[in-house]
Image (cartoon, rainbow, N blue to C red):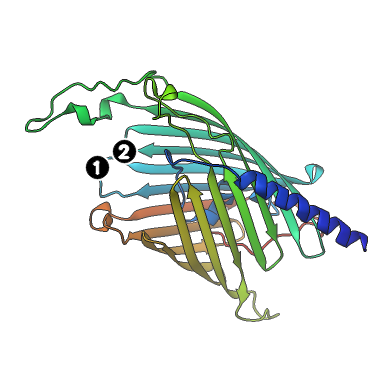
């Protein structure tokens, strides 16, 4: 057996073992993570194996305002930095995220990521990412209301028997992992966040009762390809392509399936997506050598649609110049929004 094929077989054995470890568990639904509509504009947050997949350093900022029609704010912001490091044969990255829910629950995260890159064949590359995260969650008691505070006629007039055990923030250490395989035309990835399923209880006595609150594992599967519509010409650099993609996320009993298509012509991108049972999505973007800007709007199709106001999301990325990489460095044709 050729040595290259021997290595490939052994690598794929390792991959399937890792997949089994990552995805084998029992889980219950108590808490959910924010998910960006432009998930490929924040690839390191989507899957830690994306870290360093760009040939040069990049700084990405995302802002999401969900359901502005409701009172209270559902706002998520993030800043990501990652780059490839030759000496480490992989990428290093940092993710800072803030999630505000109805002016009551605040979650702040800081993640540090390393992703190892391995060329298995002349065309296929596999990345394995590992992520450590510090999470701080806090709640504003003044904005909380409970069922035992309600009088049948007079409304909220009682004091609640539900007491927060500690008004100070809850601090959590968490770990995640992901795999990414790609060629110059096709890619697929899997990731599992919150491998330790840390407890996030804020209520007194919840740690020892059936109401114990944990941060469930978040499983992500994504894949896509790029279809060139015109051949490259020496007279123009304006490429035209279609990029169908799929994203599936499961966290506890919650599932989300996104199916969509990007159309790219030159520096401009338009995307159309359907999030099963929830919304239609339109994305507009511009991608240059230095700057990438994207905007998306979620048109909610569920019963919340008439009141929620949909969701707005803005992404801005700065691609820092670096010296050309060696020929052994391989990039992928992955969407940027």
Residue 122 percent across, percent down from the top left: 82, 64
In the image, residue 134 sits, relative to residue 81, either above or below, namely: above
Name the residue nearer the viewer: 126 or 112: 126
Q: Earlier in the sequence, mark 1 or mark 2?
A: 1
The residue that mark 2 highlights is 102
Task: Say which residue appears at 44% left-offset and 65% top-offset.
Answer: 273
Secondary structure type for disc 2: loop
Residue 280 percent across, percent down from the top left: 38, 64
328 relative position to 212: left or right:
right
Residue 44 percent across, percent down from the top left: 59, 47
212 relative position to 190: left or right:
left
146 relative position to 122: left or right:
left
The residue that mark 1 highlights is 71
Cα separation, mark 1 vs mark 2, equals: 7 Å
Note whether residue 238 is visible.
no
Secondary structure type for disc 1: loop
Q: Are the residues flagged by discs 1 and 2 in contact, CB closer than 8 Å? A: yes
């Amino acid at each position: 057996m050729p040595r290259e094929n021997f290595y490939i077989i052994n690598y794929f054995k390792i991959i399937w073992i890792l997949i089994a470890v990552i995805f084998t568990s029992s889980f219950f639904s108590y808490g959910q993570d924010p998910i960006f509509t432009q998930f490929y504009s924040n690839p390191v947050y989507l899957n830690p194996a994306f870290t360093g997949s760009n040939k040069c350093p990049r700084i990405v900022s995302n802002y999401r305002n969900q359901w502005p029609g409701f009172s209270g704010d559902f706002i998520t912001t993030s800043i990501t930095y990652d780059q490839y490091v030759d000496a480490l044969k992989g990428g290093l990255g940092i993710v800072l995220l803030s999630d505000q829910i109805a002016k009551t629950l605040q979650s702040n995260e800081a993640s540090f990521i390393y992703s190892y890159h391995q060329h298995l064949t002349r065309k296929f590359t596999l990345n394995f990412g590992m992520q450590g995260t510090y999470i701080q969650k806090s709640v504003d008691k003044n904005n909380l209301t409970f069922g035992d505070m309600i009088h049948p006629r007079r409304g909220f007039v009682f004091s609640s028997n539900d007491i927060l055990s500690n008004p100070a923030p809850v601090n959590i250490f968490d770990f995640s992992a992901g795999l990414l395989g790609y060629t110059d035309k096709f890619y697929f990835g899997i990731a599992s966040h919150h491998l330790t399923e840390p407890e996030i209880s804020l209520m007194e006595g919840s740690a020892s009762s059936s109401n114990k609150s944990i941060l469930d594992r978040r499983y992500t599967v994504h894949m896509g390809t790029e279809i060139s519509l015109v051949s490259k010409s020496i007279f123009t650099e304006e490429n035209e392509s279609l990029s169908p993609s799929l994203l599936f996320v499961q966290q506890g009993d919650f599932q989300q399936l996104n199916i969509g298509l990007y159309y790219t012509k030159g520096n401009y991108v338009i995307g159309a997506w359907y999030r099963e049972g929830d919304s239609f999505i339109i994305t507009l973007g511009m991608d240059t050598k230095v700057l990438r800007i994207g905007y998306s709007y979620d048109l909610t199709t569920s019963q919340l649609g008439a009141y929620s106001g949909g969701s707005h999301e803005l992404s801005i990325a700065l691609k820092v110049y670096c010296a050309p990489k060696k020929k052994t460095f391989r990039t992928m044709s992955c969407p940027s929004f």
